[in-house]
Image: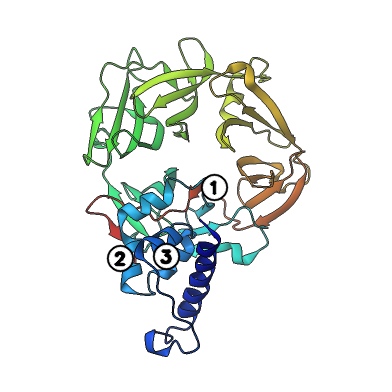
Amino acid sequence: MNCDHVFYLLYIYELCSRIIKHPTMRKDNLRGVRSVFLPQELIIEILLRLPVKSLVRFKCVCRLWLSLISDPSFAISHFEPMATHTKRLVFLTPRACEFRSIDFNASVHDDSASTALKLGFLPTKSYYVRILGSCWGFVLFDCCQSLHMWNPSTGVHEQLSYSPVAFDMDVRFFTFLYGFGYDPSTHDYLVVQASNNPSSDDYATRVEFFSLGANAWKEIEGIHLSYMNYFHDVRVGSLLNGALHWITCRYDLLIHVVVVFDLMERSFSEIPLPVDFDIEYFYDYNFCQLGILGECLSICVVGYYCSTEIWVMKEYKVQSSWTKTIVVCVDDIPNRYFSQVCCTKSGDIVGITGTTGLVKCNDKGQLQEHRSYCNGPKGYQVTVYTESLLSLPSGSKLEE
């Protein structure tokens, strides 16, 4: 983009901001504003460089812009080439049914960095919501015996069905792994679910996935997994390099590993944990939380009333690259608890305190700031999502 294009970008941005701010400022009322006529190709090129928040607002500038920005091909073009996507947090208070979008790069005390989100498609009465992952601008969550895909930036949402196994009382399978991802080879969103039957002799395992394109669940046959979670909790997968990742136990070897599911190949593999991982008791692995820091796999070893360790795999799938990078002292943190969520552009680590709010620590593990968002006993849930204009196949709905 040359200098003239940059000028027009700034000019159009300013002009549109004025139009949005003053709705009566339309065609015949734009006195004092110099007219600019640009080819449609240049307008598209300029719009592709604007942030999602501005594009959503600029839909009301004129019918042409509404048509351009609403075009699914424009949304894909806007999302794919961006080297640095805008990422935010979805902060959910499950029992209070409160959703917030938070700019985690800003100060936690900056009120303008937090926005309340409305989900009018959910029941108005009290309900429990469980976040199951995020991918390509969409957040997947479980509510009222249904799965929901939702774009916090645009309000687009789609209700998905549960796996038929979930309602089959004759088949006692319990889900222990959940994941949400995207298969670029088929341009399809996938929900992956692994279940097992602890009462069976061989601890039978069932793996299936929901294809948004096919609008159906499909079992992956011929797979026997020797994995389980000790407390029968549901682990949510971390998405990286086109694969979902979980920490779980191999009950046949009595060891813990990182399980990897390749979304294109529909196959499983394993990544060993660090060689010098200092976990004293077997059950303490339940406090090891897998995540993504930057573009690397990370493990947060949560220690109640003591320090929290953060390990990072600097070279993907290379066991020797696991490195203990940060030790967070929890003495000054509310509840003396810290669990990582993400890192900021400046290198600070954003985490949660368990039942109250967000915490930021520097790269030396020292507390920088904290803010409480709730005080309920049920706590809250947090996930990182990427702002996007992406829509879903036909049948999806737009939240007004």
| 221 w.r.t. 376: above or below | above
Give the amino acid at mark 2.
Answer: Ser
Kindly identify the residue that appears in the image at 31 percent across and 24 percent down.
206
Query: Counting other residues with Cα less than 10 Å from the Cα at mark 3, is it few (<14), some (14-19), or many (20 or more)?
Result: some
Count of marks, rendered view: 3
Q: Which of marks 3 and 2 is nearer the N terminus?
A: 3
Q: Quadrant of the C terminus?
A: bottom left
- Mark 3 — residue? 56
Identify the disc placed on residue 84: 1
Give the amino acid at mark 3.
Answer: Val
Residue 224 at x, y = what percent?
A: 34, 15
Residue 286 at x, y = what percent?
A: 56, 28
Give the amino acid at mark 1.
Answer: Thr
Identify the disc placed on residue 233: none
CA separation in Å, label 3 and label 1: 19 Å
CA separation in Å, label 3 and label 2: 12 Å
Task: Give the left or right position of residue 275, taking residue 54 as reference.
Answer: right
User: Is residue 168 in view?
Assistant: no
Q: Earlier in the sequence, mark 2 or mark 1?
A: 2
Q: Disc 3 vs disc 2: which is toward the camera?
A: 2
Residue 131 at x, y = what percent?
A: 44, 45
Q: Residue 316, located in which quarter of the rendered image? A: top right
Query: Counting other residues with Cα less than 10 Å from the Cα at mark 1, is it few (<14), some (14-19), or many (20 or more)?
Result: few
> Mark 2 near mark 1, Cβ–Cβ under 8 Å?
no
Question: Circle 1 sits in a helix, a strand or a loop, which is it?
Answer: loop
Question: Circle 2 sits in a helix, a strand or a loop, which is it?
Answer: helix
Q: Earlier in the sequence, mark 3 or mark 1?
A: 3
